[in-house]
Amino acid sequence: MGDLGRDFRRADTLLWFGNEAIHIWDERKKTESCIQLLGPDEWIPYVPKYYYIWEEGERYREELRGLLGTSPLNKRRILAATPEDITVMEAAAIEDFICAALGGGVRYGGLSLYSQSQLLCPPGSSAIAMTRSCRCYCASLVRDGEIVERLLLDVNDCTRDELLRAVRDFHSRYHDNAIEVYYPQTEEDWLLMGLGAPVEFEGIVERWAG
């Protein structure tokens, strides 16, 4: 198990693998950018768009290199935020993509993967993170960067009432109605809007960097 606070402080690059784009924070330049994920010509249910970073691998690798550089003197420490429902094979493939783009050396001490929910919630506190992938909505109770409990709901069947019920259940089970709720503002989602406090991408960087 990693130490999110330590790995975040050591990292100079944050990659957020969203539904429509890879969002990038370059700590060295203090800049935010993104790589749009185009996906297939024909929509395929439950297949993440980030799958296509391998189908059109060289194009996406070149784009990432262009944003971050690949010089031996430019060795990066990468922290990648991935969806909650990611599989072991998907995580390994994301690691392979990053190493192919930026050099295999990042795999050894320079690359850490954490879930998006872990980064959404402020360090040193308990909070509820609400996220969405192409497959699931996820409600997670996070305590000081670690997921205590989570609920995955089918993205095509989930309703706003179910998400509100998940929040109420966490408040009830942990006897604390004051637990804050956060969701990412990296991509607009109507079911998540208003459930709690939206967190911009730069806001995630600020709360963990501080």
Image (cartoon, helix red, strand yellow):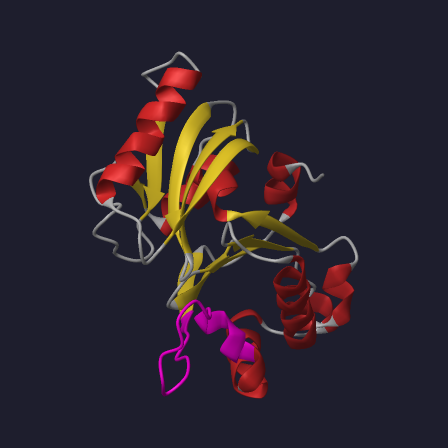
Q: Position of residue 127 (x, y in %)?
A: 42, 27
**Is 207 on the left-hand or right-hand side of 104?**
left
Tell me where the magenta segment starts and ends, as one range. Answer: 35-53
> Main SS of the magenta segment?
loop
Tell me which residue sits at (61%, 58%) in the image.
87
In terms of depth relative to the viewer, which is nearer, 165 or 86? 165
In terms of depth relative to the viewer, which is nearer, 92 or 172? 172
Q: Is residue 64 above or below residue 76?
A: below
Q: Position of residue 57 (x, y in %)?
A: 58, 83
Tell me which residue sits at (69%, 40%) in the image.
2
Asked if one can make out residue 61 in the rendered structure from this viewpoint, the answer is: no
**Is 144 on the left-hand or right-hand side of 154?**
right
Q: Is residue 103 above or below residue 201?
A: below
Q: Quadrant of the N terminus?
A: top right
**Is 23 on the left-hand or right-hand side of 13?**
left
Tell me which residue sits at (31%, 53%) in the image.
157
Q: Residue furthest front?
A: 157
Q: Position of residue 39 (x, y in %)?
A: 41, 79
Q: Residue furthest top?
A: 175
47 in the magenta segment: yes
In terms of depth relative to the viewer, which is nearer, 194 or 59? 194
